[in-house]
Amino acid sequence: MKYSLEFKRDYKDVFGAYMLRGAEYDVEHYDIPYVDVKEDIILPDRLISYSKINQTDPNSNTFVHFYQDDYIFDGTYGIWNALLYDSQFKKGFCFDKLKNVKGIICPDYSIYGDMPMDQKIWNVGRSRRIGSYFNRIGIPAIPNVHWLGPESYEYCFAGLRKNSVLAVSTLGCLRSGLDKSLFIPGLIYLVDHLKPSMLILYGTLTEEIKSILEDNDIKYLYFPSEISEAMEAKYGNERK
């Protein structure tokens, strides 16, 4: 479904509705906009965090990720406000920051179990809205998928196409038995229901995760987090 987003000349767009022009909505799941990844997308060979975007080599096929604390990319001068008010902040987000990268992994806005439901749905929805908008203006954006327990799947997997490219981070998802008990079933659900054509995995690749993906013939690209790289550099030889 598509909605009419025509406004009277005297009205000001304080809702960022311009980002939704031409979007298609997941009408069965809160009207969250779909993130339509182009079939001919050139996949990243490197991921770099938003806070280190100035360190990007313009000759590499680098994508920016937002697997960081929300305050780094959100807030007064964050990516959402820059787009919401159609403004460019010199000390915050602006499109010039993306000039040396080939695309983004959609922002990873936090969804905590003790958040009110409306805030969790909102954080998923605005991540999808950014991805939907970026793809329509020619900036490749891969949807980021983050979930809690089974009760969250209805909104956490909204706005995602089947057989598309998706991104997942394991940061903070494998620290405890409880974290793992939420992450692994959600990953299995994602694989079974969405069957991604490619999964971008950032963080740590365990044997269990690897088995789930390979047993289901899911292609994936693994990018270790900075912490994982540091641990591998320190203990890699000992583990071998």
Image (cartoon, rainbow, N blue to C red):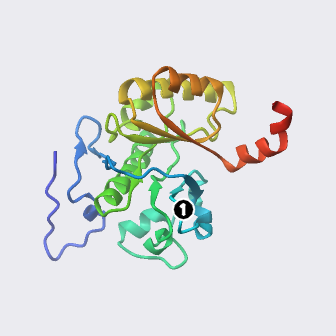
Give me the residue at 46% from left, 22% from top: 216
Specify whether 184 is left or right of 86.
Answer: right
Quadrant the N terminus occupies:
top left
Residue bearing mark 1: 60
Q: Residue at x 56, y 29 (%)?
A: 183
Give the x, y percent position of residue 59: 53, 66
Q: Residue at x 29, y 36 (%)?
A: 29
Q: Residue at x 57, y 54 (%)?
A: 46
Q: Is residue 186 above or below residue 228?
A: above
Quarter containing the C terminus:
top right
Pinpoint residue 13: horizontal percent, then vertical percent: 26, 69
Residue 130 on image: x %, y % = 37, 56
Query: As rendered, which of 191 and 176 lies closer to the eye?
Result: 191
Residue 124 horizontal/vertical position (percent): 41, 45
Question: Residue furthest toward the front?
Answer: 59
**Image position of 6 with respect to 165: above or below:** below
Q: Amino acid at mark 1?
A: Ser
Question: In the image as oriented, which residue stretches furthest toward the bottom?
Answer: 90
